[in-house]
Image: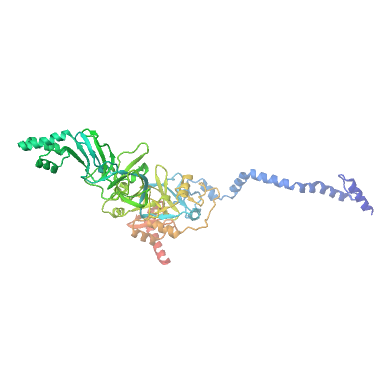
């Protein structure tokens, strides 16, 4: 009971002193617990944070100490060596340790002296090369399209106007001065036939000339008669009329003016009783059996027009002129077929267009001059001069061109940099190269899919990337993209830092890669020999085709295939050993099958 009172009293008093009733050793332990253990427990979190801060600040020092104590003696020796090891297929992978393998293709590394990093020049027409891991290819959704012949056309739409056929326009003028006594055709728009009387003109000169003709006939003056006869012919008096005048002996006082063509009067200049001078216009006539449709073509589409020389050679017109479909606003359901008849030799400076002309038959006069028309010009590849020049006559390509078939690539596969056009071609699984190509103008297939005709740079059967922007972006972001395997890790050049050996979830198709590499060999016999050899005789276990197209060399008259160019020196250093190894590889391949 007294102890409980003493404790309660101590709790009420508080202070830094031991509870009453403790012995000497008990009090000592109490002060140790209070001063040491309790404070350490409170400060342990602060101590941990301080320790973490020191580790972060001094991390490089700790890493250097660890690397120094864990690095092997061989690696230290390699660091000071004058040789290095690299992957022939991926030249950016460089290591100092010969036991390492390429983190991309997992092939053994090749030895060389430092400073011998000789970059292989790209072939003409190839602007860059790039490789992507299978995972990267799937992730980016890269798809290819086989280059082949496609039936292409180009439809150029423009607005045209219906115009008079200038060759069918005639103006009737007074050939002699006089007075219009009668207008037989006295209204604009009236249809007339050739030879129809238009007006009757009284002329004193006509009376005098007719009388001279009669007098010369009666007197037998042939010279005077011929002069009067010729003058009357020039004035429009027919031979029958003059014969009738001579027969009757009566002078004709009026000149009948007749229509020279079948058409309609679209302008009348005179009235009855009006005096006219020689050469004064009386009527304007137009024949509407044929009309002109004139449209405007912009500069971007002028390349589809035939050369101007075809329209100047009248003796040899174009054997296959461009066709067009024409519709008018007053009759949109009835298209008219027409052929290109002329292209103006100059460009309008204001509209930056060139005028094209189509001549259309118009027997029912449904096409009225002055109306607007929608013109759709249909262009086939055979009409393009740039394509016709690239195909020799008599060849299969020329015959296909005449049918509208031309080697082409999709519009989306082309990257236009302004100065050049680039297409990425797949040379193997995940391997792409940028090819500089010459292309014709943009056209479309029957399903309205856009294509570019290929003039130079690609062949039938090549696989091109249909959406090459990711591949092109990779090469532009890294100038060394010609040899880097994007999606994997090439590590550091020195080989001292840690290498992340990334294995993509989508494995590489080695068989497809080998097949693509063997396809690059020029002859079938070489492909069979390479397949029989299977592996490289210099680098053990290096399968032919996994590092690109096999390299063919001749060793003592026998064809030998290597995995890469860097094995050439090793193969030629000991020819007998190389041939022995080749025979061994062939036997092993046969037994394996």
Q: Point out the image quarter for the N terminus.
A: bottom right
Please indicate whether residue 398 sits to the left or right of residue 491 in the image.
left
Query: Does residue 590 sit above or below 267 in this rendering?
Result: below
Q: Which of 576 and 582 is in front in this view?
A: 582
Residue 465, position in %: x, y?
Answer: 43, 52
Residue ID at (31%, 43%): 163
Q: Point out the image quarter for the C terminus.
A: bottom left
Which color scheme did the rendering employ for the protein? rainbow
Please indicate whether residue 207 sits to the left or right of residue 314 in the image.
left
Residue ID at (5%, 36%): 219
Q: Which of 398 and 331 is in front in this view?
A: 331
Visible residue check, residue 124: no
Furthest-left residue in view?
220
Q: Which of 310 and 411 is in front in this view?
A: 310
Residue ID at (13%, 44%): 240
Residue 125, position in %: x, y?
Answer: 37, 47
Q: Which of 522 and 390 is in front in this view?
A: 390
Query: Does residue 231 sit above or below 512 in this rendering?
Result: above
Residue 246, position in %: x, y?
Answer: 10, 40
Query: Does residue 82 sit above or below 460 in this rendering?
Result: above
How many marks on residues?
Answer: 0
Residue 287, position in %: x, y?
Answer: 26, 45
């Amino acid at each position: 009971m007294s102890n409980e009172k003493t404790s309660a009293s101590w709790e009420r008093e508080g202070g830094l002193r031991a509870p009453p009733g403790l012995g000497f050793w008990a009090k000592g332990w109490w002060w140790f617990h209070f001063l040491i253990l309790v404070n350490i427990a409170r400060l342990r979190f602060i101590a941990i944070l301080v320790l973490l801060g020191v580790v972060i600040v001094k991390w490089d020092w700790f890493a250097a100490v660890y690397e120094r104590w864990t690095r092997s003696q061989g690696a230290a020796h390699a660091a000071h060596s004058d040789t290095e090891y690299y992957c022939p297929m991926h030249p950016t992978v460089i290591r100092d340790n010969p036991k390492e393998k390429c983190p991309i293709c997992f092939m053994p590394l090749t030895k060389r002296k430092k400073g011998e990093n000789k970059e292989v020049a790209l072939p003409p027409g190839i602007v860059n090369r790039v490789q992507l891991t299978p995972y990267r290819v799937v992730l980016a959704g890269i798809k290819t399209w086989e280059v082949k012949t496609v039936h292409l056309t180009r439809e150029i739409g423009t607005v045209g106007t219906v115009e008079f056929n200038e060759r069918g326009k005639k103006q009737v003028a007074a050939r002699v001065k006089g007075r219009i006594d009668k207008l037989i055709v006295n209204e604009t728009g009236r249809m007339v036939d050739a030879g129809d009387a238009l007006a009757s003109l009284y002329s004193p000169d006509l009376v005098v000339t007719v009388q001279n003709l009669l007098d010369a006939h009666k007197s037998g003056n042939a010279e005077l008669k011929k002069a009067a006869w010729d003058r009357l012919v020039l004035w429009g008096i027919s031979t029958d009329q003059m014969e009738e005048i001579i027969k009757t002996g009566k002078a004709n006082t009026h000149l009948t003016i007749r229509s020279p063509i079948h058409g309609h009067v679209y302008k009348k200049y005179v009235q009855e009783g009006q005096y006219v001078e020689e050469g004064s216009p009386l009527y304007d006539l137009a024949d509407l059996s044929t009309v002109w449709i004139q449209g405007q073509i912009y500069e971007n589409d002028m390349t589809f027009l035939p050369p101007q020389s075809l329209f100047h050679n009248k003796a040899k017109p174009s054997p296959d002129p461009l066709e067009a479909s024409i519709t008018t606003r007053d009759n949109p359901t009835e298209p008219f077929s027409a052929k290109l008849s002329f292209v103006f030799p100059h460009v309008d400076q204001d509209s930056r267009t060139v005028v094209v002309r189509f001549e259309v038959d118009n027997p029912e006069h449904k096409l009225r001059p002055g109306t607007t028309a929608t013109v759709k010009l249909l262009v086939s590849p055979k009409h393009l001069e740039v394509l016709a020049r690239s195909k020799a006559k008599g060849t299969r390509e020329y015959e296909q061109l005449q049918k509208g078939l031309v080697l082409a690539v999709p519009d989306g596969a082309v990257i236009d940099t302004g100065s050049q056009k680039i297409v990425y071609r797949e040379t193997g699984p995940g391997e792409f190269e940028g090819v500089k190509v010459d292309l014709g103008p943009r056209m479309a297939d029957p399903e309205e899919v856009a294509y570019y005709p290929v003039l130079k740079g690609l062949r039938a059967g090549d696989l091109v990337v249909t959406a090459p922007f990711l591949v092109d972006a990779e090469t532009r972001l890294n100038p060394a993209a010609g040899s880097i395997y994007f999606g994997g890790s090439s590590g550091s050049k020195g080989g001292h830092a840690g290498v992340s050996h990334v294995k993509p979830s989508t494995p590489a198709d080695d068989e497809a890669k080998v097949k693509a590499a063997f396809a690059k060999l020029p002859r079938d016999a070489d492909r069979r020999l390479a397949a029989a050899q299977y592996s490289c005789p210099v680098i053990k276990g290096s399968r032919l085709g996994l590092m690109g197209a096999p390299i063919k060399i001749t060793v003592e008259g026998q064809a030998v295939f290597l995995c890469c160019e860097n094995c050439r020196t090793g193969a030629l250093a000991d020819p007998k050993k190389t041939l022995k190894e080749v025979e061994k590889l062939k036997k092993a391949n046969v037994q394996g099958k």
